[in-house]
Structures are given as C-alpha cells and as structure tokens.
Amino acid sequence: MEGTFGYSGHYFDRFIQSQDSSVVNKFQKKYWKTKQTLIKVTGKKEDEHVVASDADLDAKLEVFHSIQRTCMELLKVIELYQRRICFLSQEENELGRFLRSNGSQDKSRAGKIMQATGKALCFSSQQRLALRKPLCRLYQEIETFRYRAISDTWLTVNRMEQSRTEYRGALLWMKDISQELDPDTHKQMEKFRKVQAQVRTTKTSFDKLKNDVCQKVDLLGASRCNLLSHVLTTYQTTLLHFWGKTSHTMAAIHESFKSCQHEVSTVKASQDSTDKLDKKMEKKSTEEDMEEKKGDETPEDQLISLGHEDGCEKIREELDGVEDSLALLNEILGGLFVDDGDVSQEWTKGFGDTETSAASGGSAETQQQQDNSFFLPSQLLDQSLNWTSTVPQSATCAAECSSRAEQNPSKPAAKETAGTSKDLSAWFNLFADLDPLSNPDAIGEANREHELHTA
Amino acid sequence: MAYAYLFKYIIIGDTGVGKSCLLLQFTDKRFQPVHDLTIGVEFGARMITIDGKQIKLQIWDTAGQESFRSITRSYYRGAAGALLVYDITRRDTFNHLTTWLEDARQHSNSNMVIMLIGNKSDLESRREVKKEEGEAFAREHGLVFMETSAKTASNVEEAFINTAKEIYEKIQEGVFDINNEANGIKIGPQHPTTNSPISSNQGGQHAGGGCC
Ligand SMILES: Nc1nc2c(ncn2[C@@H]2O[C@H](COP(=O)(O)OP(=O)(O)O)[C@@H](O)[C@H]2O)c(=O)[nH]1
Ligand SMILES: [Mg+2]
C-alpha cells in the first residue's frame, strides 16, 4: 500500500505528524485516559483480563482498606473503653466513699466493715485508672500510625490508581489501534509505535507503583502487628497488676469476713454472696477458690450474687444508658453465667414481690435502724438509685465488719461480736422480710443455674 | 523484496517462554539473554524459499502478559500460521496451552496452521514437561509439534519453515483462498494472480499451479 505513495508524500506526512504530534499526542492521551476514567466511574465492565492481571494488587488493596478501617474502629473502641473505665472508677469510688462516710457514722462493727470495703473500693477505683495510661499510649500510637504510615501508603495508593487509569487508558488506545494494524503500512506503524511508547511508559510507572503499594501494604500490616503486640504488652501488664492488687485487697477483706461467719451464722448467705460479687467484679479468681465456692455454695448464694450483678448492670445502664456495658459484663462473666438474663428476670420477679413486703412490713425496723443511723437497704428503696444497689452495699457492710475486727485485734473480740450480732440480728430481721431466698421459684431457678455452672 | 507469497505468522504463549527470542533467533540468528518485555506486539520478517518460491514470513510476536490478552486477540485475525509456545522448564506454561488454543481457534480462521513449540530444550536439567507430553498434546489437538531452543538455535529454523511448508501445502490443496487476505496469505506484487479477479479456491490452486 505504501508503494502508492512517493517518498515526498511520506516525508510530507511525517512532517505534518511531527509538527503537531505533541499536541495531537497530548490530546489523544487525555482522550483515552478520560475514557478509562469514565469506564471506571460509571462502573462499566472493564476488560476482564486487565482486571485479572491486577488481582494480586487488588487483594493487597483489600488488606490496606481493612487496616484503615480496623484502625479507625480500634481508635473508637479504645476511646469508648477508656471512658467506660473512667465511669466505672467514678462509680466505684462514689460507692466506696458512700460506704466510708456511712460506715464512719456507725460505731458498730458493721460500720467498720463498711469503711473497710469502702476503702477497698476507692483503692480499686484509683488503681483501675492506671489502665488509662497504656490505653492512651495505644491510642496515640495508632493515631500516629494512621497519620504517618497509613496516610503515606494512602498517597502511594492514590498515585498508583492515577497511574493505573493512565495505563488502562493506554491499553484501550492500543486495543483500538490494533484493530487494523499492518506492519507494512508506514503510517499505521508510526501511530502504533506512538501508542506502544505510551503503553510502555505508563506500564513502567504503574508496575513500579503497583510494587510499591504491595510492599507498603505488607510493611503496614507487619508494623501494625508489631505496634499492637508492643503496646498491648504494656496494657496487659498494667491490667494484671491492677487485678492482682485489687484481688489481693478484696481477698483480705474476704478472709477477715470469714471469721465473722463463725460468729454470726446468719450472715453467711450475704457474706458468701459478697465474696462472690467481689470475685466477679475482679474477674480474677483462682481455681481453688472456685472449687471451694462451688463446694459450699447454696442456691441462695447464687441468687443473691446474681442479684448483685443485676444491680450493677442496672446502675451502669442508668448511668450512660448504653446497653453495651451489659454485654461487656456478660462477656466478662460469660463462662459463669450461661443464662443469667433469664435468672435475673426471675430474680427481679421474686425480689419485686418481696420489695413491697419489705416496704410495708419492715417499716418498724426501718424506723429503728434509721434512728441508729444504721444504713439499711430499705432506705434506698425510695431514692432514685436502683434498689438492687442496696444489696451489695448492705452485704459489704457485713464484710467490712469482719475485716475491721481483724484489723483491730486489740479490741475484745467478744464485745465486738456481741455488738455486731445484736445489730445484725435486727438487720437480718429486715433482711428476712426482704429475703428473696424464700421464693421457691427463684430457688428452683438458682438450682438450675447451679447445675449449669457445675456442668 | 520480491516474494511470491507473504504468510502472516503469530507467536503466542505465556510471557517469558521465549517467543521474542525465537523470533530474534529466526530473523537475526542471534540470542539475546535479556529481552525487553513485549508491549502489545513486535514484528519480524524473513524471506524463505519453499519449492523454489520466495516466501516472506511476516511474524507477529505478541505479548504474553494477561493484561494484553484482549489486545493480542485482534492480532489473530488474518494469520496463516501460529506458533504456540510453552517453556519446557515451566509446567504452568504447558498447563495454559488449552486456554491459548481456545483463544487461537476462536479468533483466527479455522485453516490456520498451529505449531506447538516446547522451547528452552537446552535446559534439559530443569525440564518439567516431558517431550512425550508435548507430543501427546499436539496429537490430541491436531497440531505439529517441535522442541526448540532459541538459545542454541536448535529446531528454530525448522519450526518456522515447517509451518510455512504446511501452509504452502494447504495452498496447493486449495484449502486456503489466497485471494482472501483474511487467510493471512498475500500474493506478491509481481505474481500473476495479483490481477486475477477470481476469488475462490480455484484461484488458490491457480496460484499454486503458477508457482510450479
Ligand atoms: N536457556 C534458554 N533461555 C531462553 C530461551 N528462550 C528464551 N530464553 C530466556 O527466557 C526469557 C524470556 O524470553 P522472551 O523471549 O522475552 O520471552 P517472551 O515473553 O515469550 O517473549 C529471557 O530471559 C530469555 O533469555 C531458550 O531457548 N533457552
Ligand atoms: Mg516477548
């Protein structure tokens, strides 16, 4: 075909082409890039082979987006967790202070128990705040990771996507020009070489950026792993330290509480349950303790402790109205209370009945106790605080009593016990009215629950 | 430049099997250990003589990378012969043959002569695909088979020339319509049938006859 053109014609042709080649070339490049952009934006089906050849890159991009997303989520979770820790500590501290102030007004042994428990709670609340430091650090590290590593990778990803569009545009161009290609036709070959050069340069740049992205994403994943394992170790250490300390304190109270057990047998139920509550709140409990408790745990104990838990949850719910805390607590206690939602309901039902009887039937005692400035569960019934919160408080009163007794061995034990037993008997009269343990349905429920635990 | 016929060849197969090296060995009689990646397609040409006739082979060396697959499909059109190449040291390139064959059969004319080539036969120690496997595949799919080495030039000439002979035979048999350029055969400028308005198998035979 080219034979029909004379040499002059050829040169003229070439002359024309070289004259506006840069302009035409630019325009053509733009045209095909825009075409590719349009295909991408409108979600039109792209060349399946071209897409398939980027499969490894696209898989890496998935990983990148997942890292991006999960880092954001982690930040949010840390923020929330940190705030919850604060709330919990505040509540615990308030409870502790409440116990202490009320305990100090009560010169009896119960008052001392309250004070000791209150102190322990205040201590625990302060200790818990130490968790915030490693959490803050984790937050900062991830934030830095996001600002530096992720955004750097993101820039590379963006550049790669630009380059990918150019490359795919060039491929479209090449495909177009390949429809009619004759190597013996000069004009066509010239055009083809131009497109080929464009494909080559865009491919080189794209391949390089593709490689950069893959490497960076790999590095990003690895460095995040490294970061997390590093910072989380500090967090774990702090957490263990906190639980260790708190559990130690609680165990000491529990220990002294035990001595009270022999003296006042009726306290047993509430003691055990308090003990149990403490353990649960601590989440940490040695196998030995578990065995021991399982051994002498009566269905009633179980029920009371469940009640406590229910109360805790309700307080928290009232506080921030977020259901998540419940779920979290459930998760923490997960293994222990397979089914505690039901039990709690059952318990509420049972307690709801006795609540009314306590309010009416126990009024005489209430009056008497108030005169003695002795704290009573029923006093709280009228208050805005949830009723269940009174149970742990009253129960820990007893716990504190015994711990105090141990802490002050100089005081004559007999006198102390006599006073306490007198005080507590009145206290327990009331408690008997309130006693949900007499609810046979609830007991049955607790038995079932107990079976579940031991199973 | 004078030739009786021009045959269009296409070289296909996975990237890295040695397509470009085969072409270079055939056209320039040299081996280049590091060859640029083929972008889209490269061209080569060489004159051969069959049956006393000058035949120009116009060879399209295609890019094997997947991203060029749609582009290279348009190069099948009008090819009289194809060299389907795999690398005897890479089993995966052999496994992909079916896909290549399907592609070739779908986008080329049905008379296209396909030569199966197991390249890099010099790398005997690293062989992953037995010669018998190549032969079996060729037999099963009606292809001509040959093991070559673009490095030592072993069988390279033969591969290209035998393909041309097959095409030439088909012309003689009248299977190819040489007046239809879609078949990948052009008649040389000074060939008597160039001016022939007849476009039929007879024309092909006539051309063949004229050659003899
Ligand atoms: N040893 C050996 N190496 C070869 C042979 N043919 C090609 N190569 C090498 O294989 C690589 C790819 O060759 P190339 O022709 O670019 O493959 P293409 O992608 O199919 O065109 C190059 O590094 C060549 O040096 C051969 O016959 N023997
Ligand atoms: Mg090549």
Image: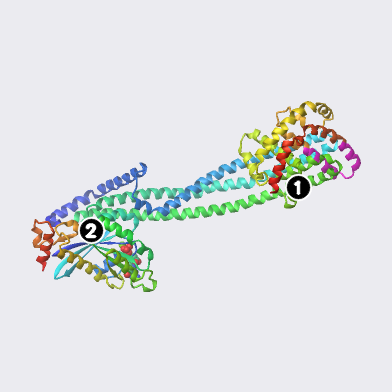
Q: Position of residue A285 (x, y in %)?
A: 72, 49
Determine the image quadrant of residue B188.
Answer: bottom left
| Residue A295 lies in the magenta-colored region | no
Q: Residues within 10 Å of mark 2 (few under 14, many from 20)?
A: few
Q: Is residue B126 left or right of residue A390?
A: left
Q: Residues within 10 Å of mark 1 (few under 14, many from 20)?
A: some
- When the figure is inspected, residue A139 is found, relative to residue B110, above or below; the finding is above
Q: For the N terminus of chain A, which image quadrant?
A: bottom left
User: Does the rendering let one see residue B159?
Assistant: yes
Residue, x 31% and y 51% (percent of image)?
A: A171
Disc count in the image?
Answer: 2
User: Does the rendering let one see residue A375?
Assistant: no
Mark 2 in CB contact with mark 1 (< 8 angstroms): no
Helix, strand or loop status at disc 2: loop
Determine the image quadrant of residue B185.
Answer: bottom left
Circle number at residue B110: 2
Helix, strand or loop status at disc 1: helix
**From which residue to which does the magenta span run?**
A395-421
Circle number at residue A293: 1
Q: Are marks 2 and 1 on the same chain?
A: no
Q: Nearer the viewer, residue B6 or A132?
A: B6
Tell me which chain the residue with mark 1 is part of. Answer: A
Q: Is mark 2 within 8 Å of ligand 1?
A: no
Determine the image quadrant of residue B111.
Answer: bottom left
The quarter of the rendering in which ligand 2 is drawn is bottom left
* Label 2 to label 1: alpha-carbon separation: 86 Å
- When the figure is inspected, residue A131 is found, relative to residue B90, above or below; the finding is above
Q: Nearer the viewer, residue A6 or A274?
A: A274
